[in-house]
Image (cartoon, rainbow, N blue to C red):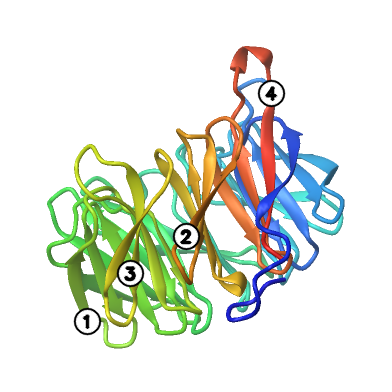
Amino acid sequence: MHRVGSSPPSTPVHVLTTISVANPVGVAVHSATNRIYVFNHGDEIHPSTVTVIDGNTNSITATVEVGLYPTGAIAANSTTNKIYVPNGTNSMIVIDGATNSTQSTSVSTGSSVCPIAVDPAINRVYLICGSTSELTVIDGATNNVSIIPVATSSYFDSPSHIAVNSAIHDVYVSNASRGGSTEDIKIDGTTLQTSAVALNGVGPSICDVAVNPRTNKIYVSAGELLAIMDGKTLSSQTMTIGDYEGLIAVNAATNKLYCRSKESAGSQDSVTVMDGSSLATSVVPTGQYPASIVVDEGIDQTYVVNRDSGTVTVIDGASNATTTLPAGYSPENAALNPLTHRLYVTSFSADVSCGPNGTLTVIDGPH
């Protein structure tokens, strides 16, 4: 595979294949086993499923039922070979990657999509669901559950996003308030002790949160505003970055931040690229309605999944040059295998009257 600073790749980034799946709304990758797990939404009659795909052959190896009301989130722990699917019946479905067998752990979920994150080094799973003001922490070894308050009220405060610094096992939960104040909750993953950090001037609506584990900087986006927090001192600063809701992704290797933005009202959708050291920014045009941003640090390449264009914009990290690839009808979620440098993009069914006919687009990185 191409590495930063090496000669140009002989094979450019391209769509390798497209795999038919049911109604995909989420995807996770187990990098060590090279298995891809696609969450397919069911209904009140037909259970939701997880399609298991062999990344070596791009063939479907199993279909695992995960209940009638899963929330659409899915995450994998590549160290323990466990896959986690929050279920709307107040449980977490845990799939054993070796056998595809399942077990259920009681958690408080609700019916909305649950942000979920995993710290594989200490084998902990973090979950926020519904209107709860709490963070659910699951011990991956025992499935024991701990509840951490991260807001004063489920009505006035809305924890919405999770980011994990696996290098030091800190967890960050963004917490917007209907009263107008916004704060970030830092949780020590080893002790579960919390610290609240006020983000003055940011909010009340939080768009995303991301961590650079090398610099220990935490980024919280809220519309045109971006808060930058020091994970050690908990001091923060705020800057303007674009004028649209900002999905964010970090390339820790190059210390760059990629944030969904628009240059001005009515202009083309774009991604703002910010240098983490100088805070200098540049704007890269994308397709319509970027719904996911995924960074491949190993080849310094960023993928922007454009829902309304049915495309993926590929950004070269060194030059900001772009390539556009097709990705099916209404693509929205994506996951990367950093070992094979392949991206997996889910797309909804083009015609729901035809039944489950979604797709998974496999994009092969340059090599």
Residue 145 in the image, given as x and y percentages of width and height: 55, 62
Location of mark 4 (residue)? 356
Q: In which quarter of the image is the C terminus?
A: bottom right
Q: Residue at x 62, y 45 (%)?
A: 345
Q: Decide if residue 288 is on the left or right side of residue 221.
A: right
Residue 6 in the image, given as x and y percentages of width and height: 64, 80
Q: Which of marks 2 and 3 is nearer the N terminus?
A: 3
Give the alpha-carbon distance from disc 1 to disc 2, as whole Å. Answer: 34 Å
Inspect the image, locate mark 1, and give the three-letter code of the amino acid beneath it.
Answer: Ser
Q: Which of marks 1 and 2 is in front?
A: 2
Location of mark 3 (residue)? 274
Query: Does residue 171 lie above or below 247 as drawn?
Result: below
Give the alpha-carbon distance from disc 4 to disc 3, as whole Å. Answer: 40 Å
Residue 134 in the image, given as x and y percentages of width and height: 38, 57
Q: Which of 233 and 143 is in front in this view?
A: 233
Q: Which of marks 2 and 3 is in front?
A: 2
Q: Which of 277 and 98 is in front in this view?
A: 277
Inspect the image, locate mark 2, and give the three-letter code of the amino acid beneath it.
Answer: Ala
Q: What element carries label 4?
A: loop
Q: In which quarter of the image is the N terminus?
A: bottom right
Inspect the image, locate mark 4, and give the three-letter code of the amino acid beneath it.
Answer: Pro
Residue 119, label in figure: none
Give the alpha-carbon distance from disc 2 to disc 4, as whole Å. Answer: 36 Å
Q: Earlier in the sequence, mark 1 or mark 2?
A: 1
Q: Can residue 48 be seen in the rendering of this structure?
A: no
